[in-house]
Amino acid sequence: SSLELGPYSHFMQKEIHEQPKALSDTIEAVLDAGFCPALFGDRADTVLRELEGVKILACGTSYYAGLTAKYWIESIAGVLCDVEIASEYRYREAWVHPKHLVVTISQSGETLDTMEALKYAKSKGHCAALSICNVAESAIPRASELVFYTRAGAEIGVASTKAFTTQLVALFTLAVTLGKLRGRVDAAAEAGYLEALRHLPGSVQHALNLEPQIKAWSERFAPKNDALFLGRGLHYPIALEGALKLKEISYIHAEAYPAGELKHGPLALVDQNMPVVVIAPNDALLEKVKSNMQEVRARGGELFVFADLDSHFSESEGVHVIRTPRHVGVLSAVVHAIPVQLLAYHVALARGTDVDKPRNLAKSVTVE
Ligand code: G6P
């Protein structure tokens, strides 16, 4: 397998670095055809035109892709979107609207809870389901009327990386396509979204180039027992994903919060032993994030901030800053997934854990 790894030490590192290519491959069809229903299969035109809401079901990292999608689907398409953990949904008496499209997200297409949640949704009367999946002809896409295959290529590291970012662009494509069908995205807006997609692999490559700086930070995290991740809006699910990655492979306890919730609990945990990672690109919520950061500093918490050039952050005592690529607007969440993956990877290396096969975890969970 050293041959397959090339210059990389682990599959996870290799897969993190494959993201510009994985993203280019996944968006190729979108760049060629524009945001059109046919991207989701032959039956998609009618289904996407007629749906009245979206119900996303997934587990793990795929669930966080779903949480990100909610922001896009509601803001770009103006369609109600609700996201639920598959293992919870399948066991509750759910309220069903037949015209809500079920969207499952699964790298493997074989996760038992997601498959059972899909079957349950169908049995309760949902008319159609869309599968966003990375493995052709796996169980979940086979059980779905519509399908969008991400083209991340085989993912071997247990902790999902390139599958996640390609899921994000698939879901973004869904949001814009729905917006077009509803007359909310006109030709000029569509051109803007295509342009954003076209620039994405390059921005992701810039984010990958931050690896040496992130590696330097990892030394400070390695001896810690806990970490807090903060983000707001579209970057909140990325904070969740960053915390999950850190837990999975470095075994450091990590939690993520939307920064506005800090005062409702987690602030009590903040002291000099609690590193706080903040995802703080320049968006509408930046000023709010800055004031949340002051609350952390005032309690002695050390801040590790990912901020783009436009955020105008400078380093100061207890405030470390890594500059992410110039703000890429609506796809910023995808770009900011990269530095938190790299942080988890290098912290795990520093702690000497088995990065590609973390204890107690499996790549694909096909049992309950
Ligand atoms: C396992 C993997 C995760 C993955 C989750 C869902 O827990 O370790 O990386 O996110 O399953 O898997 P799926 O294949 O359905 O996306």
Image: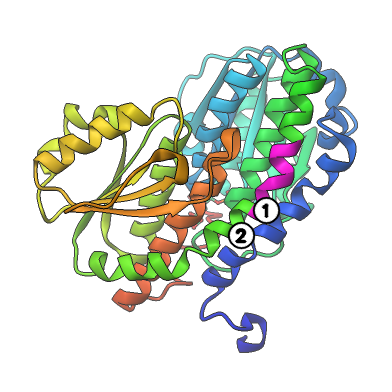
Q: Which residues are magenta?
A: 195-202
Question: Is mark 2 in CB contact (under 8 Å) with mark 1?
Answer: yes
The one of 92 and 85 positioned closer to us in this rendering: 85
Magenta region includes residue 161: no
Asked if residue 128 can be seen in this view, the reply is no
Q: Residues within 10 Å of mark 2 (few under 14, many from 20)?
A: some
Position of residue 101 measured from the top left corner of the image (x, y, whole percent): 68, 22
Is the CB–ligand 1 distance for label 1 below 8 Å?
Answer: no
Q: Main secondary structure of the magenta part?
A: helix
Q: Give the SS element for disc 1.
A: helix
Q: In the rendered structure, which amino acid carries the disc numbered 1? A: Pro
Asked if residue 232 can be seen in this view, the reply is yes
Position of residue 113 measured from the top left corner of the image (x, y, whole percent): 53, 43
Magenta region includes residue 200: yes
Is the CB–ligand 1 distance for label 2 below 8 Å?
Answer: no
Q: How is the image coloured?
A: rainbow
Q: Work out whether 48 lies above or below 39.
A: above
Q: Residue reaching furthest bottom?
A: 2
Point 49% across, 30% down: residue: 84
Q: In the rendered structure, which amino acid carries the disc numbered 2? A: Gln
According to the picture, the residue beneath numbered tag 1 turns out to be 201
Position of residue 76 measured from the top left corner of the image (x, y, whole percent): 64, 21
Position of residue 149 measured from the top left corner of the image (x, y, whole percent): 76, 47
According to the picture, the residue beneath numbered tag 2 turns out to be 205
Q: Give the SS element for disc 2.
A: helix
